[in-house]
Image: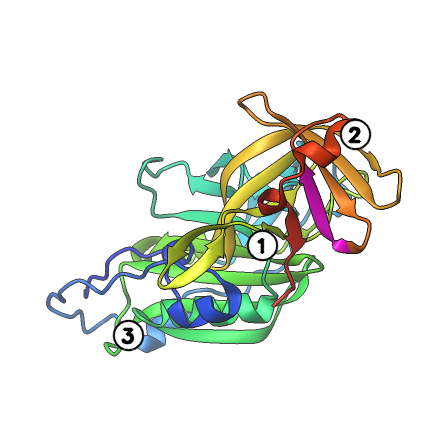
Amino acid sequence: MISIRRFSVTAAVLPMVLLLTMFSGCSKSPAAPTAPDPVANTAAIRTAEPAAPSIVGTEPGRRDGERFDGVILLEGMEEPVHYEHIRNVTVGFEMDYDYEHFLRHSEADREWFVSCWDAPENPENYLEVRYSPLTAETAAAAISETLSNDYEIRRDDSFSLDRAGRCIRIVADEIKGGGFMPDLLQTVYVIPAADGCRVATAHCAAVESEGFLRRFRYMMNTFSAAADPDTPSIPGMWQTASIGYSDAGSMQPEYYVRFAEAVILYGHLKDGQFVLDHSDKILSFGEAPAGGIRVQAEASNGVQYTYQTCESDDAVLEYYETWQEEAFPETYRGGASLSSCAQH
């Protein structure tokens, strides 16, 4: 079997898309091939992921953390499965996951569900979900180009999930130019949302793909992009006025910024997805005296600061390094103020 180095959508560079979307990453070249396996052909690959019907026992509107039993079909036989419903407001999705077969790992900017049989520090079989501020079409184009460096890909722009509806699915299960199955397969689901999209990537070893792809597909059929209507957040992506670094010859802001349930998230864009650098705690959220919003937060070093809608431009949040309104004129910092990022 031809071997290909592991390579994740979330770690790839797309210089062309960087010009349009100000994000980057890096891709790896395939390893030197070994003797090909004549049995691993394209026909076998294209039947690797059978269609998965809806899970018996799931339903919308479940509470976060609620557990329940479901039934799925594997190899033509019903199998009882134990599910837990999760709701991640920061990443912006909810889903049911099979907690007997997968271990949930939560990070500030992603959720991933790793096979309980894999080594957690180096898993092969896992489903990863991230937020992207890009439109689904732009994110899918970037992901497709990156994966096509190492894989022959198939893209379906009319794929449908039970809960999320129409999305874009990208399948990477054939070595580029070789017609053989790689060691690691990837199936990427790009789900549109009002604030960008969600990118869910199913990674699995080729030798275990039939079972894992089907289980991942069942989980994805319970997926929906969601935001908490009671969360006092500011929609969309923002960016600082100050420039932080140059990547692949393109200047980027010091931080991209998102507002979540009780924190302000500061990060960068990588492969079109938001990667967290640090977060500050929101202490107060309300209306500014002249209209718009006022958010007061505290950094980990104790600095207290305020974001407030600019009176002349509601696409700008002015930064003041204080909570005291009377001190605003002396503590205004233009380079730390935020402007709304246009959707691509």
Quadrant including the C terminus: bottom right
Residue bearing the label numbered 3: 176
Secondary element type, mark 3: loop
Q: In which quarter of the image is the N terminus?
A: bottom left
* Mark 2 vs 1, N-terminal side: 1
Residue at 59%, 43% in the rendered image:
336
Identify the main secondary structure in magenta.
strand
Q: In this view, does 93 lie to the left or right of 200?
A: right
Q: Which of the two marks, 1 or 3, is nearer to us in this view?
A: 3
**Residue 297 counted in the magenta span:** no
Color style of the picture: rainbow
- What residue is pinned by disc 1? 220
Instruction: Give, as a single range, the part of the protein colored magenta.
Output: 314-319
Disc 2 marks which amino acid?
A: Glu
Residue 338: image x %, image y %? 64, 48
Q: Nearer the viewer, residue 330 or 209?
A: 330
Side (left or right) of 240 relative to 164: left
The earlier-in-sequence mark between 3 and 2 is 3
Q: In this view, does 34 lie above or below 199?
A: below
Q: Earlier in the sequence, mark 1 or mark 3?
A: 3
Residue at disc 2, secondary structure: helix
